[in-house]
Amino acid sequence: MNHVSNDFILKNVSEDLIDMYLDSCITAAGMCECPRCRADVRAFALNNFPPRYVVTDIGDVLSRVDLLSNQFRADIIIAIMNGINLVMRSPRHHMAARELNLDAVIAQVEARTGGQTEA
Ligand SMILES: [Zn+2]
């Protein structure tokens, strides 16, 4: 009688697809890859794309995802790219390290500390 087992799961395939494409979109866009910026893009995409829930047998999730249309995939990627545009315009990480001239920063740090060993 206890046939209510865990052989099925409730899945939001929108979330699965967003996670599937998130990192490659971020890399392709040249966006800051720090955890905060990544989380901001993920939140934006999840908030701006309708969830699509399926109840499916475990192990069947990927095949269900494969059945989704190319248009659905394209819409997911567009939602991610919109989030990337937003985050790139106003990143909310503490230091916009990617936007700094790293060589200049290193030169400054070395000028302050280099050759002058602090007592
Ligand atoms: Zn960042």
Image (tube, helix red, strand yellow):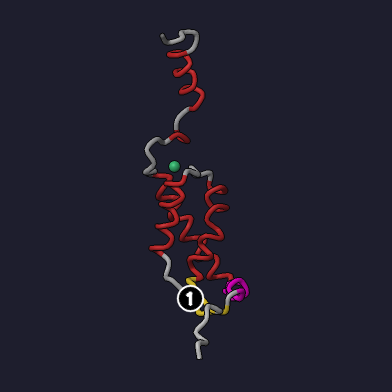
Residue 75 rendering spot, x and y as whole percentages: 50, 66
Quadrant of ligand 1 in image: top left
Does residue 67 show up magenta in the picture? Answer: yes
Does residue 51 show up magenta in the picture? Answer: no
Q: Is residue 104 above or below residue 53?
A: above
Query: Residue at point 50% right, 8% down?
Result: 115
Q: Main secondary structure of the magenta part?
A: helix
Residue 78 rendering spot, x and y as whole percentages: 49, 60
Camera-side residue of 55 and 92: 55
Q: Is residue 20 above or below residue 50?
A: above
Residue 5 rendering spot, x and y as whole percentages: 52, 81
Q: How many marks?
A: 1
Dot 1 corresponds to which residue? 10
Q: Is residue 24 above or below residue 96?
A: below
Residue 35 rendering spot, x and y as whole percentages: 46, 46
Camera-side residue of 43 and 8: 8
Task: For label 1, count other residues whose C-alpha is less than 10 Å away and answer few (under 14), some (14-19) or many (20+).
Answer: few
Q: Residue furthest front?
A: 1
Is 22 left or right of 67, judged from the image as shown? left
For label 1, the SS is strand
Tell me the magenta residue range: 59-69
Q: Is residue 21 above or below residue 68?
A: above
The CB of the residue at mark 1 lies under 8 Å from ligand 1: no
Is 25 left or right of 87, judged from the image as shown? right
Residue type (three-letter) at the residue carrying disc 1: Leu
Q: Which of the 4 image quarters holds residue 73? A: bottom right
Q: Residue furthest bottom?
A: 1
Query: Residue at point 43% right, 60% down?
Result: 45
Query: Residue at point 53% right, 65% down?
Result: 17
Query: Residue at point 46% right, 9% down?
Result: 117
In what quadrant of the picture does the C terminus appear?
top left
